[in-house]
Amino acid sequence: MKSIEKLEKYLKEHELRHTLERTSMLEYIIQLDNHFSINTLMNDFATTHHISKMSVYRNLELFLKAGIVVMHPFPGDEIIYELMERAETHSHRICTLCGAVKEFHDAKATKLLRSHRFKGFTMKSNHIYIYGICSKCRDK
């Protein structure tokens, strides 16, 4: 299901209003090619769309609950988010020294996880995070 459809379904199921702010913010997130933070939204989106910081936080929280975006546990001070549609197609290698994040695709791992059956649990999505030391830090 596409992100806009997920939003419409979530709003209807929870009897929430469909607002121009929400739709515009989601459309902005959809066109991003990478991870983003609250600061990204505030610096790039909120300044041109005249939306308050509190509205950005509320809408982002709604997008998380609706399964439209995912929050990543990357090291650093900023919380990093990504569109769920994009996050489901790759995994992440994270350097524990410098915090560098590299995306990678592993079809075998994805296939294995999707085919695995968990007793009493239905998997909706999965994310792989591999923590280690990147070649730049290792060579120092």
Image: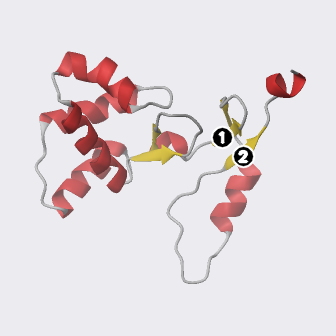
Q: Mark 1–mark 2 contact, CB under 8 Å?
A: yes
Q: Residue at x 89, y 23 (%)?
A: 139
Count of numbered circles in the view: 2
Residue type at numbered disc 1: His
Q: Which residue is mark 1?
A: 92
Helix, strand or loop at disc 1?
strand
Horizontal side of 24 relative to 134 (left or right) equals left
Judge the density around disc 2: few (<14), some (14-19), many (≥20) Cα neighbours within 10 Å. Answer: some
Residue found farthest to the bottom = 120
Helix, strand or loop at disc 2?
strand
Q: How far is the residue under mark 1 from the one under mark 2?
A: 6 Å
Q: Residue at x 53, y 43 (%)?
A: 87
Q: Which mark is residue 130?
A: 2
Place of residue 23 in the rendered image (x, y in percent of width and height, measured from the top left): 21, 36
Judge the density around disc 1: few (<14), some (14-19), many (≥20) Cα neighbours within 10 Å. Answer: some
Looking at the image, tell me whether mark 1 or mark 2 is earlier in sequence order.
1
- Which picture quadrant has residue 110? bottom right
Q: Residue at x 20, y 37 (%)?
A: 54
Horizontal side of 76 relative to 38 (left or right) equals right
Place of residue 37 in the rendered image (x, y in percent of width and height, measured from the top left): 42, 31
Residue type at numbered disc 2: Ile
82 over 9 or under it: above or below = above
**Residue situated in front as seen by the camera: 57 or 66:** 57
